[in-house]
Image (cartoon, rainbow, N blue to C red):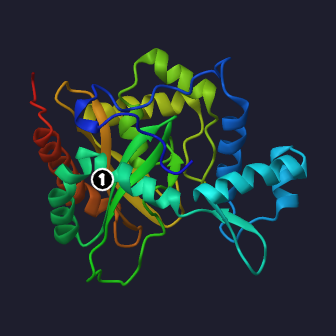
């Protein structure tokens, strides 16, 4: 479901990073489970999906699926294309997603710093939270006068694996050993590109380095042709609760540029945001 990854306002939480995916509880309400699955599938099919195909995907009779869709449509969570008769996500979810994003104090506090970083680097800036061991993009800043005119395909609400992204790696690098082991067990290390680290032992060593140096690089590990450098944001108790990154085409965001300037830029900006949230080094 759209951006349902945060249960409390950011500033009041001690740690918004989700722990490794929990086992399924015994008291789930079946109807809500079905509705959640339907909404997920609608989200995965932007052009819409027929009731027959949807029924097949959720393993429910067509009549049951139709009743659920009728309720969702009435309440605004789903809609039907009048021409194709396919079902799509409803605009109520956009409304709720915007309300949720507006409630995140982090976005408000970080906005001027992210805008400044984008202006200085002329590259795309992302900010993410960790939810069920995936990164969820909660903000994105692009400059209008981007020198190449290229635009990143990322968007607010998009999810990516944590192990293959710079922002994800800086966050899971702060996992205690037990949590990290659960992370490896609960989710396979999908090979996104030829550069993705998929060996558990190798990734563990890499994450130790990431934590020690305070930043991570996505060296075309999540998307071919895109390089990113990310750093963690800490809250007042010193927990890594979010991350930001500078992203751009690999031909422009070169390894040399990352080492010469961009890693410093992203780390300094992340520290400023952390301090805005009450973080104090050495506390």
Let me know if residue 29 appears in the view: yes
Residue 188: name its quadrant.
top right
242 with respect to 198 (left or right):
left
Pick the front one: 185 or 273 = 273
Q: Is residue 122 above or below residue 91?
A: below
- Residue 26: image x %, image y %? 68, 17
Pick the front one: 157 or 38 = 38
Pick the front one: 62 or 261 = 62
Residue 42: name its quadrant.
bottom right
253 with respect to 268 (left or right):
right
Residue wearing tag 1: 102
* Residue at 82% from the left image edge and 65% from the top image edge: 50
Q: Is residue 10 above or below residue 74?
A: above
Q: Is residue 173 above or below residue 41?
A: above
243 with respect to 7 (left or right):
left
- Residue 113: image x %, image y %? 16, 57
Let me know if residue 221 appears in the view: no
- Residue 254: image x %, image y %? 34, 65
């Amino acid at each position: 479901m759209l951006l349902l990854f945060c249960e409390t306002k950011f500033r009041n939480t001690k740690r918004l990073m989700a722990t490794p995916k929990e086992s399924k509880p015994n008291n789930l309400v079946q109807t809500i489970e079905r509705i959640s699955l339907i909404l997920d599938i609608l989200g995965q099919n932007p052009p819409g999906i027929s009731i027959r195909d949807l029924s097949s995907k959720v393993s429910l009779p067509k009549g049951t699926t139709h009743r659920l869709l009728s309720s969702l449509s009435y309440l605004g969570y789903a809609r039907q294309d009048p021409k194709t008769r396919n079902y799509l996500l409803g605009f109520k979810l956009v409304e709720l997603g915007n309300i949720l994003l507006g409630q995140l104090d982090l976005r408000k506090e970080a906005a001027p710093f992210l805008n400044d970083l984008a202006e200085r680097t002329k590259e795309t800036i992302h900010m993410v939270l960790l939810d069920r061991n995936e990164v969820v993009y909660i903000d994105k800043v692009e400059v209008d006068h981007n020198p190449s005119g290229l635009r990143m395909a990322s968007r607010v609400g998009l999810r990516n694996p944590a192990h293959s992204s710079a922002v994800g790696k800086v966050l899971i690098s702060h996992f205690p050993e037990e949590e990290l082991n659960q992370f490896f067990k609960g989710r396979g290390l999908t090979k996104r590109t030829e550069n993705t680290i998929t060996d558990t032992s190798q990734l563990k060593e890499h994450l130790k380095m990431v934590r020690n140096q305070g930043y991570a690089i996505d060296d075309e590990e999540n998307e071919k042709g895109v390089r990113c450098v990310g750093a963690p944001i800490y809250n007042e108790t010193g927990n890594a609760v979010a991350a930001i990154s500078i992203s751009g085409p690999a031909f422009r965001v070169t390894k040399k540029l990352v080492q010469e300037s961009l890693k410093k830029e992203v780390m300094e900006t992340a520290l400023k945001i952390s301090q805005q949230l009450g973080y104090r080094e050495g506390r």
